[in-house]
Image: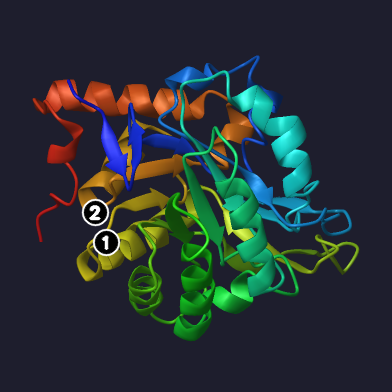
Amino acid sequence: MNLAVQIGKISMRNPVMTASGTFGFGKELADLVDINRLGAIVVKGTSLRPWKGNPPPRTCETPAGLLNAIGLQNDGVDDFIENKLPFLRQFETPVIVNIVGHAVEEYVEVARRLDEVDGIAGLEINISCPNVKEGCIAFGTTTEGTAEVVSAVRKVTKLTLITKLSPNVTDITEIAKAAVDAGSDALSLINTLLGTAIDPWTKKFRLANITGGLSGPAIKPIALRMVYETAKSVDVPIVGMGGITNGLDAVEFLLAGASAVAVGTSTFLNPTTAIDVADGIAEYMKKAGVNDVKELIGSVSE
């Protein structure tokens, strides 16, 4: 069976990658997960300068989900290049860097610096994180903001660009079209849904940030619907994500039009979930008599 897929110029041995923010920079889980078995690894959000993130508490479990308000804590792009990328270069798995910024100029400078080093296959432009007060989702909720960031980044890099879209919009297809028209080679969706939680006994919010991004199985039906709608509206590869816990979940996203999938929150419960999902896709293909995973993409019947 052939599980290989192509996202822009990125060749993946199977259609399963890690979702940014849930797999660290690879080294954190390398003792538990064979990184060479992943289709691609998407590292944690990386900014121009170090970001300290939001104050704790920053996570909260909810029914069938997780709220997080980490705030994209990271040590900055220079630290990534010097201290984290060398570890990743030892693997055959393509490395995709999720880039973030408070302003367009910050996205551009991060992309420019990453374009100049070896070992990076693509950039995921994060214009959809709801947990920072400036940048990110401020760009990703309008077609104008989306186009501004994507077009600016496109000018400074030859790497494959994947734009990560927010579900916190009225019509995600309009944002998707703006990203593609501005030069994005692919799209990833969805990022987390904005939510909150309250402790009835203390009468306080469970997150210091008050709101956080909801992920996990609870959002899967929404993610699946948005991937389906987006796949019908643009002609670029889509990386589907949102509540994937097993191979059949991933197959649903492929049928809806995704060319690849990303596993996120489930990794916190079981670090090997991404590999288990890839094995699950192969098992489904064997039982369904499918020889090439690309036969599944967008093949749902209406």
Instruction: Please identify the quarter of the rendering in which residue 204 is found.
Output: bottom right
Q: Indicate the quadrant containing the C terminus: top left, top right, bottom left or bottom right.
A: bottom left
Q: Indicate the quadrant containing the N terminus: top left, top right, bottom left or bottom right.
A: top left
Circle 1 residue? 228
Q: For mark 1, does the 10 Å Cα neighbourhood hold few (<14), some (14 to 19), or many (20 or more) residues?
A: many
x and y percentages locating residue 46 in the rendered image: 68, 50
Q: Residue at x 39, y 34 (%)?
A: 16
Q: Is residue 197 above or below residue 84?
A: below
Circle 2 residue? 256
Say left or right for 236 vs 209.
left
Q: Please, which colouring scheme is shown?
A: rainbow
**Front in this rendered view, residue 155 or 128:** 155
x and y percentages locating residue 222 in the rendered image: 40, 62
Find the distance from the CA under tag 2 to the CA under tag 1: 5 Å
Instruction: Please identify the quarter of the rendering in which residue 53 is found.
Output: bottom right
x and y percentages locating residue 21 in the rendered image: 64, 45
Q: For mark 2, does the 10 Å Cα neighbourhood hold few (<14), some (14 to 19), or many (20 or more) residues?
A: many
Q: Residue at x 26, y 45 (%)?
A: 254
Q: Which mark is residue 299?
A: none
Q: Residue at x 56, y 53 (%)?
A: 215
Give, as a three-letter code, the residue at label 2.
Ala
Contact check, label 2 and label 1, Cβ < 8 Å: yes
x and y percentages locating residue 294 in the rendered image: 17, 38
